[in-house]
Amino acid sequence: MSKLTTTIELTHEPQGSFFFSRNASAIALSSGIRSLGGFVGVYLPLYFVQIGGNPLSLGILTSFASVFQFFALSIGGFLADFHGRKRIIVLAIIYSAFLTASYALVLDWRVFGLLTVLAAVGAIANPAIHATVADSIQPKKRTTGIAIIQAASTLPSVISPSIGGWLILQYGLENGFRIACIYASVFAFLSAITAFIMLRETLKPQPTSNPGFSFRDSFAGQMMSSPLTPSSSLKVLVFSYALVVFANGAVAQYYVLYASSVVGLTAFDWGAVVSMQFLVASVLKIPGGWLSDKLGKRRIMIASLLMTVPMILAFTLSQAVIQLVVSALLLAAAGIYYAPAHEALQADLTPISMRGRITAIWDMSSAAATALGALVGGFTFQMLGSAVPFYIFAVAELAAAVLLISKVKEPDATEV
């Protein structure tokens, strides 16, 4: 068994203003460049079905991908806290770029599914990214800062689905999707270069005389030790987030299939809808983050969850294009406030020295929830009816809101 020969000294960026945080700007810019290729994920379900797959097999493969992601995240949390953040972020983006490019070469749905499973390993960088963001923002401005990063990261996504839809319209679904994959991989490589140049490491390795410090002791063992035992509010917060992820996992791959098969939208039409959703999200996310910092993160999270329920039901009841578009936009507007507030509240409850590992626990529970949600969504969509996954979404969101109302409290003092 290999032994670690370093401990970690925490280093901080100057935090006089969020807007001058180098790491926050680096994460936002790198993610924004990468999101220019986000149209691949938008049309992946359509392409998968086109080359021979079906909704159930899509759900099964998505579930397997989440299982791979689960184990990648467990390693990623350890690496983020004991080997630093920057290197793993850059390498994971490069890995994802290669996998995206390889999609363009695949014609068999089984091989394509295998590649999507392998692509999940790229999630190994998620704990490092979340930890870097939390390290780089003042606690009092944490939700607003996270919202700014997320809005800046997704702003290019306002146009990317329409670009993907145009490629499919011009070249057909199969050829258009493959061209889109090549473009997306180029943007991913540019994203990796940006992260490599701009990011600064927030953890500094220092020599130690403890040769017996092993992987098991540092990660698996410490996960169960008292310093890493999450507070009651943090445990419930993570579990409620897992319910939200389960809800989204049940429907994520099936919005486009529902829109095309039930309402009759073309790929280009759906791309325009997704572009408008990203625009709504980008416009509302920063004011929502500011509101969370002022009124309380927990309150905003609860309100967001409760508002998504009628919107998802309206989506499933849509029989005309205008109904579907309006409900999809309202759903994006209702749900956009939850994620920044959750990430900020989790950071408030977690000391900096263990953010990578606590984030890994959070992401691992999310991966498990996605695996289950994808299986449930795929089975119910194909076997019980195309609207059933969306009803499951509504029930899970309500359950998550009830947990937040009854069990979660914001801390009196936040972690830096």
Image (cartoon, rainbow, N blue to C red):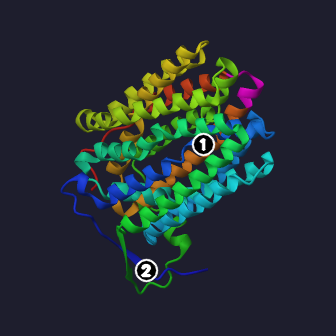
State which region is magenta.
379-386
The percent coordinates of residue 68 (x first, y second) are: 65, 55
Q: Which mark is residue 371?
A: none
Q: Which mark is residue 41?
A: 1
* Relative horizontal placement of residue 114, taking residue 250 as reference (left or right): right
383 in magenta: yes
The percent coordinates of residue 199 (x first, y second) are: 37, 65
The percent coordinates of residue 395 (x first, y second) are: 56, 24
Dot 2 or dot 1: first in sequence order is: 2
Dot 2 falls on a residue whose secondary structure is strand
109 vs 166: above or below: below
* Relative horizontal placement of residue 360, taking residue 25 as reference (left or right): right
Question: Gap in Å between the C-alphas at discs 2 and 1?
Answer: 39 Å
Dot 1 falls on a residue whose secondary structure is helix
The answer to the question of whether label 2 and label 1 lie on touching residues, with beta carbons closer than 8 A, is: no
Three-letter amino acid code at disc 2? Thr
Residue at 59%, 62% in the rendered image: 95
Labels in figure, total: 2
Q: Residues within 10 Å of mark 2 (few under 14, many from 20)?
A: some
Residue at 45%, 22% in the rendered image: 330
Three-letter amino acid code at disc 1? Gly
Residue at 53%, 29% in the rendered image: 272
Q: Say whether residue 167 is visible.
A: yes
Q: Which residue is mark 2?
A: 6
Camera-near label (2 vs 1) is 1
250 vs 85: above or below: above
**Which residue occupies the foreground of this view, 167 or 266?**
167
Residue found farthest to the left: 16
Name the quarter where the N terminus is drawn.
Answer: bottom right
